[in-house]
Image (spheres, coloured by chain):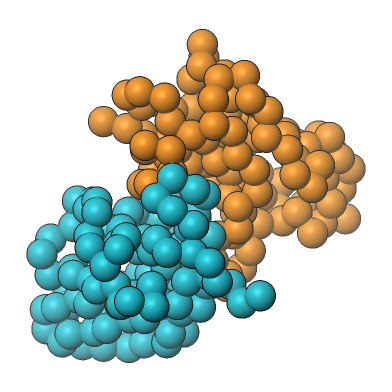
Chain colours: A cyan, B orange
Amino acid sequence: DAGVTQSPTHLIKTRGQQVTLRCSPKSGHDTVSWYQQALGQGPQFIFQYYEEEERQRGNFPDRFSGHQFPNYSSELNVNALLLGDSALYLCASSRSTNQPQHFGDGTRLSIL
Amino acid sequence: GDSVTQMEGPVTLSEEAFLTINCTYTATGYPSLFWYVQYPGEGLQLLLKATKADDKGSNKGFEATYRKETTSFHLEKGSVQVSDSAVYFCALGIQGAQKLVFGQGTRLTINP
């Protein structure tokens, strides 16, 4: 039973570029949440998708956007990258919006 | 707003020592409480959870009790092992588990 899978594992971009990160939820899960984890910090909630709609959003600018597909997989897009966007981006899935979240290993994004 | 405060690390113990990692929270309503563990280079793994006051979550020898009167959810283990070395995050779930708010994490190192 595959867990939450994220791609790519690592990514290097330059300021001003755009990036897309991908997530496949655990089998049987329909809800996907995205978190940003800066070095040495706890994860910060970006947003959550359920039934292909954004259900909740954290305190992140509109440069951060997402999408959920009919197969429940999800993408996180970040436009106009800033140096401060360098972080580990974690995807988490759950069986519904009210169940414990299971995390992937993350995508390490570095901005030069 | 909702927040989680963990004891500052790093924490270094000898094998078989008793472990306590303190966690207190501030929240409106009745959140669910979680402990997650993060091993080097990996995402977060759910360690244990409690959904209401006086619930005790337990897993792999770790325990934590949801104390509403002291707004705490301290993590304990009677005898730690080298393999317990990791970063531990306390988190609260808004509206159950829809949005997780994390503490800053506590790095634990167990020496043989």
Query: Foreground residue, B100 or B12?
Result: B100
Which residue: 60% across, 52% down? Answer: B46
Residue A39 vertical position relative to residue A20 in the rendered view, above or below: above
Residue A42 x %, y %:
43, 52
User: Looking at the rendering, which quadrant does residue B61 occupy?
Assistant: top right
**Where's the C terminus of chain B, which quadrant?**
bottom right
Residue B13 x %, y %:
77, 44
Residue A28 vertical position relative to residue A45 in the rendered view, above or below: below
Residue B64 x %, y %:
66, 31
Judged left or right of residue A102, residue A17 is: left
Whether residue A110 appears in this view of the structure is no
Residue A45 vertical position relative to residue B26 in the rendered view, above or below: below
Residue A111 vertical position relative to residue B74 in the rendered view, above or below: below
Which residue: 14% across, 78% down? Answer: A79
Query: Foreground residue, A71 or A19?
Result: A71
Whether residue B87 appears in this view of the structure is yes
Residue pushed farthest top? B69
User: Looking at the rendering, which quadrant does residue A70 occupy?
Assistant: bottom left
Residue B102 x %, y %:
43, 45
Which residue: 26% across, 88% down? Answer: A13
Query: Foreground residue, B91 or A53?
Result: A53
Query: What is the tally of numbered marks visible in this picture?
Result: 0
Which residue: 37% across, 38% down? Answer: B94
Query: Foreground residue, A4 or B22?
Result: A4
**Where's the N terminus of chain B, which quadrant?**
top left
